[in-house]
Amino acid sequence: MNKQILVLTAFLTLQLALAGILFFNNSNVMSSVESRFLIAVDTNKLNKIRITEGNETLSLIKENERWQLEDYPTITLVKSKVDAITNQLINTQVSWPVTSTKNSHERFKVSTNSFEKQVEFTDIEGHKQTLLLGKSPSFKQLYARNLADDDVYSIGYSPYQINVDPDNWLDKTMLSIDSIKEISHSLVNLTKNEDSWQLAPPSALDKQLALNESSVEDFVNQLTNLSVSGIANKAPNATNTLTVTNDQNTQYVFSFAADEENYFVKRGDISQWFTLAKPKYEALANLSLDKFISEQSPQEEKDSDIESE
């Protein structure tokens, strides 16, 4: 019995020794694999990014150090969306591939004929590199392959961070205005005197009526927090306009239009029309003096007469 125990003990010791050797060698192999950039692009020279998803494409171009959509150059983009490609994706480093065989590309959806998304990077000298993004193995992970080789990697990236829908890149608050001091409309003219809103000529009120400053502030907040729904795919005919002046005496002319169930807005300094939710359209476009007035009480009317004397 003792001899059998000794044999088993020796065998176990040998197994542990072999396992230790294999682990040590494997660790050395892993540590010897140097990390490298998935895409070798000089970000200082990068000037175009083309995204393909299915039959649709979207291109970002860099002009005067500013990234913009090629088809909609005047709109402002969400910075975090741009950074997700120009900083996060481009600076992704990899070391150990999931697979390196060509016949696995279809399975991971990173082949030239079958991919989830394709991102082509072009620099100012015309050099191109293409990245294929495939299936998502887990939350915030994607399979990715540089078209220049067969290695497939799992990278920390989410599918929603890159897409071909222009509305998803749009900064929807780009039309909002801060520090408003004057509002001019065909039916209403308002000006801010210190902290108080007043009617400006030619707008005027009867003595028994008063300006409801709370309603004016609500309207101003609609402009300072203005958020559009998306990019309009056509240029409608404007039905009315609204001129807004800020504290720096800069004037912005808003134009509005409606077409059946669609509502549109445009700001004069930007050539692009945008879609607008119906409640926001009605609050901004359908102005009338009635929205900003309330009846004075007898005492308020008396005080007003005293102030005017």
Image (cartoon, rainbow, N blue to C red):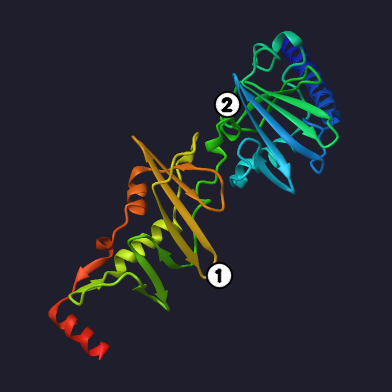
- Please tell me whether residue 222 is drawn above or below residue 37 in the rendered image: below
Residue at screen point 27% across, 61% down: 291
For mark 1, what is the residue? 248
Q: Is residue 27 above or below residue 109?
A: below
Task: Please tell me in which quadrant of the rendered image residue 186 appears.
Answer: bottom left
- In this rendering, the answer to whether 74 lies above or below 234 is below
Picture residue at 72% right of the left edge, 8% below the top: 103
On screen, residue 132 versus residue 303, left or right, reads: right
Task: Give residue 152's position: percent from left, percent from top.
Answer: 73, 20
How crowded pointer 2 is (Cα within 10 Å; few <14, some 14-19, many 20+) is rated as: few
- Is 276 situated above or below 33? below
Contact check, label 2 and label 1, Cβ < 8 Å: no
Q: Residue furthest bottom?
A: 309
* Foreground: disc 2 or disc 1: 1
Q: Residue at x 50, y 34 (%)?
A: 233
Q: Percent x, y for residue 117?
A: 63, 23
Who is closer to the viewer here, 95 or 73?
73
Q: Classify mark 2: helix, strand or loop.
A: loop
Asked whether 129 or 299 is in front, the reply is 299
- Residue 83 locus on image (x, y percent): 66, 43
Gap between marks 2 and 1, in whole Å?
50 Å
The outermost residue toward the top is 103
For residue 138, the mark is: 2
Q: Earlier in the sequence, mark 2 or mark 1?
A: 2
Tag 1: amino acid: Gln
The spot of residue 104 in percent (x, y) is 70, 11
